[in-house]
Image (tube, grey):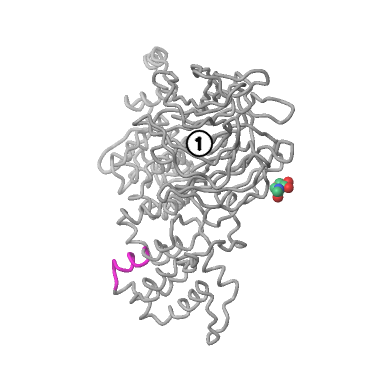
Amino acid sequence: WYKLLRFTRFTGLTAFNVFDEARSLGEHTDLIIRANDREFQVHKIILCGCSPYFRVLFSSNWTRIPEQFYDIPGMSRNIMSLIIQYAYTGSVFITEENVLELLVAADQFLVSGLVDACCQFLESRFCPENCIGICMFTEDFHSCSKLRHKAKLYILQHFEEVLQVSEEFLELSVEQLEEIIDKDELNVKQEEVVFEAVLHWIDHAPESRRKHIAMLLPKVRMGLMTSDYFINNVKSNALVMENEACMPLIINAMKALFEFDMDLHGPISLELIHQLTRPRLPSAILLAIGGWSNGSPSNVIEAYDANAGRWVNVTLEDERPRAYHGTAVLHEFVYSVGGYDSVEYFNSVRKLNLITQTWHEVAPMYERRCYVSVAVLDGFIYAIGGFDGHVRLKSTERYDPDTNQWTLTTSMNERRSDASATSLQGRVYICGGFTGTECLFSAESFNPDTNQWTLIAPMRSRRSGVGVIAYGDLVYAVGGFDGASRLRSAETYNPLTNIWCDTASMYNPRSNFGIEVVDDQLFAVGGFNGFSTTSDAECYDKKTNEWFDANEMAVFRSALNCCVISGLPNMAQYAAQRDAVQIQDGSDSE
Ligand SMILES: *[C@@H]1O[C@H](CO)[C@@H](O)[C@H](O)[C@H]1NC(C)=O
């Protein structure tokens, strides 16, 4: 013991390691565990400390093991050794090879810390290939219900990729498949994918599975399909046609899609139409936060649900008004940076926990920054330029969420307030803005490796109150004010060529609007059009190089900021209510 104590003090190890050392030397051990012909000398009290299973086993009332031996049949010596190691040291090396067996053993011995560690390990390894397997595996373990829930969510969110690569998908039972495709959370771009998933699954064992089409088809939201697809691929599908139970489903879907008045079968109920056209939940939602409305700062947050084509009021009760601020999304938090509330130019930064829906104040910036530009790069939030109430700023600082600290980085070449920033391929870009005397053409990029701002090619227009966002491989600079008028025009910057090119103009001129990319479309939201503040929104698709009208917000405002959230477990709280929603631009309008 003396030797051990000295050793411990010398190396600074904890008491746990003393016991582990004692174990390996066989000192004071009072039990031998046998697993698969290997013997382990242990101290009962240590095993009791980490496992209620052993505690009951060794309790004095328990007389089954009077001797010093305890056999654990069916346990591999490797796994037993890891369990014992965990009991003594509180840590163990989990690998892809041992994790499943270790989880089974940890569950058997009720070692909850180890169960949790195995579950965390598995969660960190989720991928489209293994998520169904992990979900099925956890079904036998009561202690893994959280992991099972997360695996299910992962399957729903990555459904299209799972379909591409998962062999386990074909092994689902009909009930499991039905449960998946029934969910609003199922993330599919088009409902056609769901129908094809059903066919793919049946095709794996057609003889035994073809009858299940009648059970699965009602879960496919046929009212969301294009009418062409429905006619050519669903209605005329051989499996569907040969199954009598599908007949009424098809008739109802036709009524929903074509508003057929089929008296013969009676009119379709509104409820059934809702069921057939109920939009899935979107995988990403655009938030429009705060701004300036009706001569005062606004606290409104509206969420745009692209699948339902609706804005939803998600304002929290204790929301504080802010305008001319920046927003950023990092690790399931929305940050609201700087800004102005008609009294104060803020250096404060608030963060919204999207899961608990609560705001917290984090460390303030060095500078007060109204008209600030914000971007996220490599896990840092950059707050760039702005106006502190007296002067327009060149300075830049960045926030590290792990340390809750702002650090000043290099200043820009130009003073810029009312510019806009984004990040693309490892650089932050900031474009346009106002110096206090002129609206700027110029733009610059920040390289975090060299900690330097570099002027890039200037834009074709002066743009203050501009919207800047990365979309595809390009930086888009949209709208703004050139010193004379509000702009409809937009241009794109290619970092590879250092060249700006004109792109399609918006329908409406606007400055100080929100800009974001969601669902692979670029949205321009609200802003000031030169005469009034607006609530309208439009979106641009780079595939067609066209702008489209989107639905307008409930509240007209400028100086708002937009951000996009995705992958939340509580997405439904930010989406339009499914029970009340009918899709607004129906698929038969195509
Ligand atoms: C949005 O919701 C908030 C909080 O529930 C409420 O105070 C506000 O009036 C709503 N705004 C609109 C435009 O409906």
Q: Which residue corresponds to the image point at 55% horizontal and 52% vertical from the top-left?
A: 549
Q: Which residue corresponds to the image point at 55% horizontal and 24% vertical from the top-left?
A: 404
Q: Position of residue 92 (x, y in %)?
A: 37, 33
Give above or below for 198 relative to 68.
below
Q: Can residue 43 be seen?
A: no
Please tell me in which quadrant of the rendered image residue 559 appears: top right
Amino acid type at mark 1:
His
Q: Position of residue 296 (x, y in %)?
A: 74, 36
Q: Residue furthest bottom?
A: 264
* Residues in magenta, as a range: 197-206
Nearer to the camera, 419 or 519: 419
Element at label 1:
loop
The prevailing secondary structure element of the residues shown in magenta is: helix
Of the 4 image quadrants, the one containing the N terminus is top left
Residue 225 sits inside the magenta stretch = no
Nearer to the camera, 129 or 221: 221
Q: Which residue corresponds to the image point at 48% horizontal and 42% vertical from the top-left?
A: 52
Residue 200 sits inside the magenta stretch = yes
Give above or below for 257 relative to 129.
below
Nearer to the camera, 135 or 367: 367
Q: Can residue 488 be seen?
A: yes
Q: Is residue 419 found left or right of 79 in the rendered image? A: right
Q: Which residue corresponds to the image point at 43% horizontal and 18% vertical from the top-left?
A: 451
Q: Which residue is denoted by mark 1 in the rendering?
A: 331
